[in-house]
Amino acid sequence: MKIPFVVTMITLVVVAGMLCAINRQNDFASFGQKSFGFQAFNFGSPQKSKAIMAYWKKKPEKVDAIKTIIKIDYAFMFVYCLYLCFSINYYRKRSSENRRWLKTWLKIAIVLIIAATAIDAIQDFKIYHYLNTEDSIGDMRYFTYPKWAALILGLLPLFIAALPRDIISWAFVGRSIRFLSQLLKSIWVFFPGILFLILPIFCFWMLGQGKDIIVAFIDNRPSGNSVIAFNYFRLIFFIAIGFWAYVSWYSSRIISYIKKKQQIETQVKAGDKFEDVERDYEAHKDYFEIGKRFLDGIPRLIGNACFLILELAVLQSPVLYTSITAMEAWLFFFIAMYILWHVNKWISIKQNPGEALEDKKYIAERQLFKKTFYVLLTIFLVLVIITSFYEFTSIQ
């Protein structure tokens, strides 16, 4: 797995968490009214910004919320400035990038990103100053517009460099249509497994009765007065989750094997040799109805999603001190699914490296994955037993 991709995934998760925290504080400070929010203050006229500041200062809790936004925003600035400069420099130094005008623009983009971050920091400092004093409020748009202009001009060359070179060509259109076709066909083929992901989301994220089950799982106490007592409810719940994930993955995997066999048999009947068709399938050739990446990747993704859905349902529970909202749950769900798709793809490549890798190294990597699997399985089973004895109480 390439380092730039790992950095991107970590940054994506951190940025998503920070944006959710900022949005939550902003909703509290503005009482859900966008016209009194943090962005409205930055984009408003001096009179409008003055009215918003007066609204915030009516309650100390709102002032504290805005100060929290500023503190998180400083951390957010550091992360996005560091990541964008890293990404721009990575694309600028790529050996495959030979467009001199774009390389020059990428150099300028680093300066623009740093300038946008500096303007953002100064603007937040000004807001913090206004919260603690009675000074007259200036026009914040003098900071907001240059900041966004510099940021957009800095992101534009990065976006161009990340795009495929042949994006304006019939070859790219053909690849896009084939990808979309295989994706839609995969959704139809694996629809039963996907349906059994949608139903638990509806049950545990939206229905009150489903949320009560999650609350009972978290806040359930063992019978008797002893703190240490075996809790059958929690153990059965864990077993049910494991069984559901295993059945969902295995049934989807069986469908994948059947679909693969049907596609290969169709090509063999058309006159192709079995060995050639098998080799083309492993090489991700485009003439298959559903390619290897979908037939291998979606069953694994369905199995991973079972645990992810339950985890996000727990994080939405009202018994937690700070539970996430449904919108935040959906955001983290799609981010996690995107990351898991690429992690599973990387594991698949490591497990099936092809003929290019030496046998000894291949066998060693397979043994390492097998040992890692058994270690993680043992840790999971130990945690299941421990949590079945441990008394959970509400931390609200």
Image (cartoon, rainbow, N blue to C red):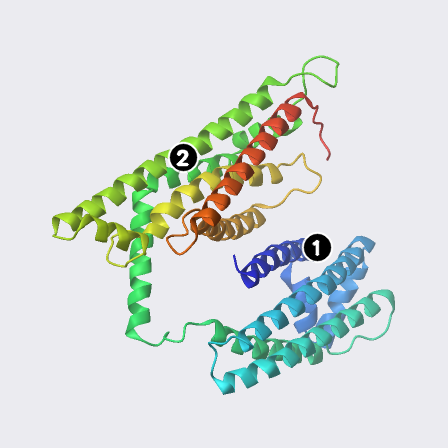
Q: What x and y, as percent, mark residue 183?
A: 33, 53
What's the residue at 30%, 45% (across, down)? 188
Q: Quadrant of residue 110?
A: bottom right
Q: Where is the C terminus found, in terms of image quarters?
A: top right
Mark linked to residue 9: none
The one nearer the camera, 78 or 107, is 107
* Residue 205 visible within the image: no
**Front position in the image: 66 or 162:** 162
Q: Position of residue 370 (x, y in %)?
A: 50, 38
The residue tagged with tag 1: helix, strand or loop?
helix
Question: How far across and down, in percent of the image, does residue 346 sit?
Answer: 47, 52
Q: Residue at x 55, y 27 (%)?
A: 238
Q: Are marks 1 and 2 in contact (CB under 8 Å)?
A: no
**Separation of residues labelled 1 and 2 (CA atoms):** 38 Å
Residue at (67, 18) in percent of width and height = 222
Which residue has dot 1 on it? Answer: 25
Q: Residue at x 45, y 39 (%)?
A: 303
In the rendered image, residue 360, in percent from the top left (x then y), is placed at: 46, 47
Query: What label sits on residue 248 in the rendered view?
Result: 2
